[in-house]
Image (tube, rainbow, N blue to C red):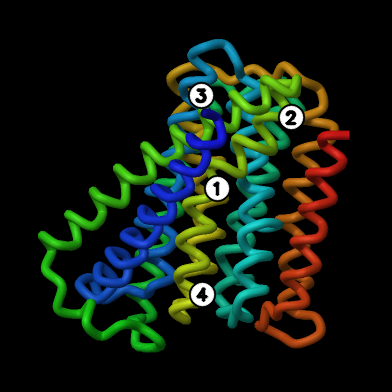
Amino acid sequence: MSVLLILLGLVLLVVGGEFLVRSSVALSFKLNISKMVIGLTVVSFATSMPELLVSLQAALDGFSDISLGNVIGSNIANIGLVLGITAIISSLEIDKDFYKFNWPVMMLFSVMLYFFLYTGGEISRTEGIGFVVAIVIYLLVLIQRARKHDEVPTEDIDDKLQGVSYFKIVVWLIIGGVALYFGSESLVTGAVDLATKIGVSERVISVTMIAVGTSVPELAASVIAALKQEKALSLGNLIGSNIFNIASVLGITAIIKPIVMQSDEILTNDIFWMLGFAFIILPLVFLPKKFIFSRYKGVIIFSAYALFIALTFI
């Protein structure tokens, strides 16, 4: 039964990812903003919903380690698993805006998370409010930058999406959101049930199986975008999801109920893996060929992710 739930979840998540990519590209035409911005907003928020639902429910049930492990593990998976596989499928061209704005913001939010946990052992309501305010400011600046540069998507996109109506875009977003919700619920339920039967701890379950499960939307959307040569959307989706996971998922969860760290391993091990994966993207983007995230770089970070999973279970 657990395996069937996992398979059902994967199918629904892939369908949801496809509809999200379609609606995002169509919306970028309507609003005359770049696909990178759409990836950082619409797609990122929709694909972060599984993490939000899982983290909120876990916190309310008193399992804060699942809330933290889910987000930290998902951020690790987004780079090590999702970016790794996406780059292996198709080399990614990196925009200069990546290191000027997007990457620094992701690192700032990651360091903020470490600081909050290191100083207080929890994410309080006040800190949660701080995260939510920060993500709102980030989105406002993002949109303002797009308008200032007058960015209009023209490269490697399906021109047929230019004539899609707002009604159809909304329908696609709803279908994608519903598919992601039920797909994630099915996959996480199956994964947790399977992990429980083999006697794995809550922390290990959260940073591995639940994290991978809730990162499948990012994987589906990014792989589909890479296959369609929507490379800007792939990168924007990944960076945006990591920012959203920390600021909106943990922020909203902490406002509703403060997140208290229960396992020391989250602060002494897991979060350093998250910071490491977030940091390593920068030198990889510049070395040896600038602004190209090639297949062999994808192999490197995917191998590092496999090592993380192995060490976590050991």
- The local secondary structure at tag 2 comes to helix
Task: Indicate the amino acid at tag 2.
Answer: Val
- Label 1, label 3: how many angstroms apart (C-alpha)? 21 Å
Question: Considering only order in the chain, which callout, 4 or 1, is on the residue closer to the N terminus?
Answer: 1
Q: Write the residue at 20% across / 80% down.
A: 162
Tag 4–tag 2 contact (CB < 8 Å): no
According to the picture, the residue beneath numbered tag 4 turns out to be 226
- Specify the label residue 215 is tagged with: 1
Amino acid, disc 4: Ala
Q: Is residue 120 visible?
A: no
| Within-10-Å neighbours for mark 4: few <14, some 14–19, many 20+ | many
Write down the quadrant of residue 299 in the picture. Answer: bottom right
Which mark sits nearer the N-terminus, 4 or 2?
2
Q: Is residue 149 left or right of residue 56?
A: left
**Residue lying at 82% horizontally and 34% vertically, measured from the top left:** 313
Question: Which residue lies under the disc numbered 2?
Answer: 204
Dot label at residue 254? 3
Mark 1 neighbour density, 10 Å: few (under 14) some (14–19) many (20 or more): many
- What is the spatial separation of the Cα atoms under label 4 and label 3, in whole angstroms? 34 Å
User: What's under tag 3, amino acid-wise?
Assistant: Ala
Circle 4 — which element?
A: helix
| Badge 1 amino acid | Ser
Mark 1–mark 4 Cα distance, whole angstroms, equals 16 Å
Label 1 or label 3, whichever comes before in sequence order: 1
CA gap, disc 2 to disc 3? 22 Å
Disc 3 crowd rating (10 Å Cα; few below 14, some 14-19, many 20+) is: many
> In the structure shown, which secondary structural element does the residue marked by tag 3 occupy?
helix
Residues under numbered marks 2 and 3 in contact, where contact means CB atoms less than 8 Å apart: no
> Measuring 68% from the left and 49% from the top, which residue is drawn there?
76
Residue 190 in the figure: left or right of residue 88: left
